[in-house]
């Protein structure tokens, strides 16, 4: 069992930056591909970014590529999402996720084993 707890969301102006953090419980953290999804009301959850168990491989949606950076610290069981050059369309609830290390791209919500409770990110214009 893995529990995921996000933090770092908030309100920021367009062009600004935020860093989301995700604390994971459990002793098998490196067994999981960690990632982030986001969701706006009335829409499905969308893939944002993912990182392999050892941290060597990262994946991004086209909408955030070049602006967001995912990273992990396996010694601390932490995952981070550095979000730069934020746009109003980035406004959403952001969820930390854990998927099997065997998961392949594209990662969909059905690939996810564990979800965090979500943290709100609001970007004002």
Image (spheres, rainbow, N blue to C red):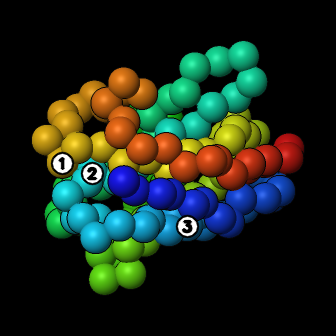
Q: Nearer the viewer, residue 41 or 117?
A: 117
Q: Nearer the viewer, mark 3 or mark 1?
A: 1
Above or below for 61 versus 2: above
Q: Is residue 82 visible?
A: no
Task: Locate residue 16: give its quadrant.
Answer: bottom right
Name the quarter where the N terminus is drawn: bottom left
**Dot 2 corresponds to which residue?**
33
Q: Is residue 89 above or below residue 1?
A: above
Compare marks 1 and 2 and give the one earlier in the sequence. 2
On screen, residue 116 versus residue 33, left or right, reads right
The answer to whether residue 41 is left or right of residue 3 is right
Q: CA distance from mark 1 to mark 2?
A: 5 Å
Q: Which residue is mark 1?
A: 101
Q: Which residue is mark 3?
A: 21
In percent of the image, x 23 and y 43: which residue is there?
100
Query: Looking at the image, is 77 positioned above or below residue 6?
Result: below
Residue at 42% x, 27% y is 109
Q: Secondary structure at mark 3?
A: strand
48 sits to left or right of 119: left
Residue name at image x 30 percent, y 75 percent: 74
């Amino acid at each position: 069992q893995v529990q995921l707890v996000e933090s770092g969301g908030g309100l920021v102006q367009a062009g600004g930056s935020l860093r989301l953090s995700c604390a994971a419980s459990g002793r098998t953290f490196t067994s999981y591909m960690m990632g982030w999804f986001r969701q706006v009301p009335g829409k499905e959850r969308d893939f944002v970014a993912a990182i392999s168990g050892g941290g060597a491989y990262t994946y991004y949606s086209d909408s955030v590529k070049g602006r967001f950076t995912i990273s992990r610290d396996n010694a601390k069981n932490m995952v981070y999402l550095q979000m730069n050059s934020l746009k109003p369309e980035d406004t959403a609830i952001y969820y930390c996720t854990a998927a099997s290390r065997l998961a392949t791209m594209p990662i969909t919500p059905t690939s996810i084993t564990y979800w965090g409770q979500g943290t709100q990110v609001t970007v004002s214009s």
